[in-house]
Image: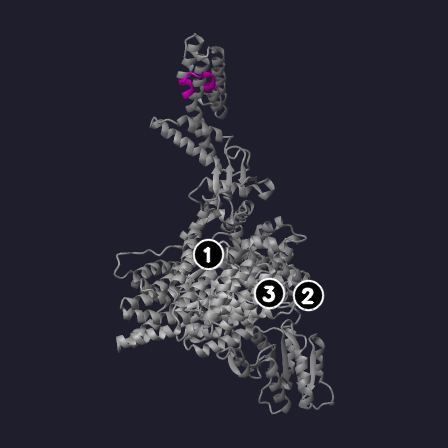
Amino acid sequence: MATSQSLSVSGAELPAHLTRFIGRDRELDEVARLIDATRLLTLTGAGGSGKTRLAREAALRAAGAFARFAWVDLAPLTDPALLPVRVAADLHAPNRADEAPIDWIISEIGDARILLVLDNCEHLVDACAGMTDWLLRSCPRLTILATSREALGVASEMAWLVPPLASGDAVQLFVDRARAALPSLAVTPAAEAAISEICRRLDGIPLAIELAAARVRVLTPAQIAQRLDDAFRLLASGSRTALPRHRTLRATMDWSFALLGEREQVLLRRLAVFAGGFSLSAAEMICAAEPLDTEDILDGVAALVDKSLVIMDAGEGEARYRMLETVRQYGRERLAESCELAAIEARHAMHFLEMAEAAAPNLVGGSNSPPLLARMLADIDNLRAACVWAAEDSSRTEVALRLVGALFWLWYADGQFREAREFADRALALEGPCTPLYRGRALLSSGLTALAQGEYESAEQHLAQAFPILRDGGDRQGAGSALAKYGAAVLLGGDVERAIRILDESMDYTQGWPTHEIAVTFARFWRAWGAYLQRDLQLARELLQPSVALARAHGLATTLGHSLVTLARIEIAANNADLARELASEGFEIEVSINDAWGIGIGLDVVALIAVHRGRFEDAVRLLSAVEAHRRRIVMALSGIAPSEREALLARMRSALGAEFDALRGEGLSLSTAEAVRLAFGELTRDTTEHRVVPALGQYVEARSGNGALAPRLRVLALGPLQVFVGDRMLEATAWGSARPRELLVYLLTHPEGRTKEQAGLAFWPDASPAQLRNNFHVTLHRLRKALGGADWVRLVGDRYRIDTEALESFDARDFEREIVAAKRALVRREKGAADHLERALALFRGDFLDGEPVGDWHLEHRDRFQRLYVEALMAVGGQLSRDERHAKAAEFYRRALACDELHEEAVQALMRCHGAMGERAQALRVYRRFAEQLRRELDAEPDEDTSRLAEGLQEGVSP
Amino acid sequence: MSDSYATTVALHEIRAEVRVRDQIMRYSRTGSGLPVVMLGSPTDPEPLWAGLHRAIAERFRLIVPDLPRCDTDIAAWLTAFLEGLGSTDVRIVASSEFCMAALDLVLADLDRIARVVLVTHGKAGGPGVDSTLATGTLRTSVPLLVVRQGTPASEAVPLVVGFCAEGAGGNGKTPY
């Protein structure tokens, strides 16, 4: 799984690079030729020599010659035992419970012509050597392109040392990267000479050149050249002789590191603890310790991005950051030297443990919260690193077992049962002290994994152990789930009588609990399954039907899908084919929409039975066979039809179809899951006029939020001094870090259709380079989300960011404008209520838009518009009051209009008339004189004729 | 089913290539673990050499390059070979004819070489290394073990294997 922003090409997830690839034409040609000529090409070279970029570009060029290619970044992987699991996952190779992960890969590749790119192999050379050797021998048309500091040493390997950049390319790279940092950089002849010297001094090593180029904001190329020269002369004992290439890079890294402030140095080394990238929130949680405060982290990360030591992947939603592997290893080395490694690793593990534990209740079922799931999967490498760290030492037993307990549903959703099992076994084997409750949860997790893999004996054993521990530890949900699943393990293991007793006990145990609790759902579902196996169909129905109603009410897609499909199975057994088809249609659509592999399997079985019932034996054979293939592809063992029943059905089909049977069966076995799903939908809609649309999961998510889970709580007052409330709490200045996040909030609110980061960047930082703009935007966005405390309130839709309307309770500027519009509409239509709308609008206007806030020019047009509307409203209300002959009151409104716009001549006239009508001629004339003087002073103009005539009339005693 | 796949590499000698600039360098590799580069032929008639070859292949990642003709600068060739191979924390075991090249290599690339074993002419207990070698050894700070070819394998092999196994992890700094 790609953890950073990635580019999908022919099924491969390639790492995205925000910077331009420069030069290397000759090398690309050579690598392309070697990819074609060898089966294992390893690009070797020191860190920073450009292996990954070259491999990426070469892979893109070579892609056309292959049926498929896959990219696997091994840098975040620390455990060599997980190498094949990782490769299988990135190849999307299905897990199979009864096979080793290497065989999943072999089955996936087979004899297809595939280019597999293994990036960053150096820390797993032996494991990579073993795996590649085996794969190349097992998959005759596989080609592997590896990048590694060290050759793998596998038969027929061609290790190819990536050469330095040619001098012209090196200069071009420097200029390109320097201009990203300082767009105004002028490459004068003198600067060009200095740049050439820098590139020569840096041996054409791309990373070294990029690090040097990032310094042009504070040093001229000549200064950089001089300082590098000084630094390197020291290293070479003053001899000015060339250093070995790997030492050149190290020297550049040292130089770059030394130029950092002390706090940045501390931050850089601490950030190296992350595997596969990090969010700013995680960096704040883990890296903020003496001498760094939480507030330092944002600025520090931004500074490191500016210096090319950290890379920002804007991605979707929240920005993530990462380090090039070479920089990360350098940072890690510094971390070890600082004696902070153990403490920071522990903080890292504890942070991700807490994150996993916080997420776990919302991931039950594996697919109930896709946005949360996506956030967790973005940190899968960090979670793995935490697992590896925890399992290393028995003193960390409790952390390891808590991780096992917390991660089950994430592994379930990601289909990583092998990994789940391996880590659970390692953690459970640790003999350090641990609170029994955590051991109980780990046993439950391990039991659920075994159950899913069809290892019923092991599942039974772990779940039986888990139940009393969880019960005694006070974890009611855990205990209830363990007992129900214990019954399920016994049931699926074939001992129906004993299973029914356990499941009855589980029903009793959960008696009276709120029906939406997962333990209740498990108990009812498996007891219903038991009733079905005993042919007590009525009991099975009675147990499942409340689950359907409940799942609908709470938007529990997984429960709804499973219950409907199982009910359909029951109705088939009861000979109610039409009802079965109806139930299966809805249930199967849900299973497909949430991509629940187990649900799809039982759904396919049920549709096959419907086809049998309708006498459509051809499709029945295809589907029965397809579901076997589907089950083989996934780790889930349970099918919707017992093995003996399946055999009997197939025998019946064989007898009915004769010679045709074998061909149909072969056809079914070769169907992919997607093809089988299409066939099943065809069967379900056959002979009906129904055209179903597969529902999006969003419907279920919305159903849940409709239950009040997401109450709008954000209130923003921007007409006047800015005030932001979350619930009843006003956010103080300290909550924002700076004024910019507040400004971004209002900016997005004034653009409800959303704004791209480029649009926001132009409004906020018009002089910044594109790289700075992206970084500034994401830092500000992060601060905004943090201040609001609800990351989801700023949504990314397409490429536009906007404030979630569901979260917004009120925004005074928006409400003000709506009232004005409503008032105008009422006036045009001569309807009542215009005055009320205007009064409400005026009540909202506490002052100018963002009055007193240090904001950019973007707000001026909005400020002017709101002010104009406000004055129009005042004039309209004043006019109505004048017509009602409430002149004193009307005069107040005209004065308010003039307070906003002293030269509003219409307001001057209206106020003069008011005073005149009230017999205050002198006052009216004072208004006129003041206006005329101001007009002359500011615009060198005279009042309109109408105004002057009005004044003359008042002077002469004529009533206005 | 294939969980034992990782062991297959260790069991067989394999042949592979390194390409550095326009030069192709071939080598054989056996075993896994810390890299040990043996300079000398596995078919060397000297019984100690064959014994060392077997013992090192069982414990280490043994790399035996196909060395170029004698008129080539062997140390320069080896420097390029090791750079292309990318190996670090390397142990060099050199037979007598490559002892000087091994020492030159150490001086050219101090970061990459962790330990050196020189298997020199002569019998155990005989006079020490010759003067040329002695000059070379004085200039390097890398741990060095000198073994005489005539030393019985039962004594020399455990000594060399033990020496090579020491100091794993090098200087702790990644050679970027």
Quarter the C terminus of chain A occupies: top left
Q: Chain of mark 2?
A: A
Q: Residue at x 54, y 83 (%)?
A: B11
Residue A942 position by quadrant: top left
Give x and y (percent) for residue A409.
50, 61
The residue labelled by disc 1 is A368
**Mark nearer the viewer, 3 or 2:** 3
Q: Which mark is residue A237?
A: 2
Q: Earlier in the sequence, mark 3 or mark 2?
A: 2
Q: Earlier in the sequence, mark 2 or mark 1?
A: 2
Q: Chain of mark 1?
A: A
Give x and y (percent) for residue A784.
53, 45
Give x and y (percent) for residue A662.
30, 77
Give the answer, above or below, for where A258 lies relative to B35.
Answer: above
Residue A233 visible in this rendered orientation of the protein: no
The residue labelled by disc 3 is A439
Q: Earlier in the sequence, mark 1 or mark 3?
A: 1
Tell me if B12 is positioned left or right of B99 in this view. left
Disc 2 residue crowd, few under 14, some 14–19, many 20+, Cα 10 Å: few
Spatial CA span between label 2 and label 1: 63 Å
Which stretch is magenta?
A879-891
Q: Is residue A707 magenta?
A: no
Give x and y (percent) for residue A639.
41, 69
**Mark nearer the viewer, 1 or 3:** 3
- Report the amino acid beneath label 3: Arg
Give the answer, above or below, for where A884 lies relative to A273.
Answer: above
- Report the amino acid beneath label 2: Ser
Q: Nearer the viewer, residue A82 or A488?
A: A488
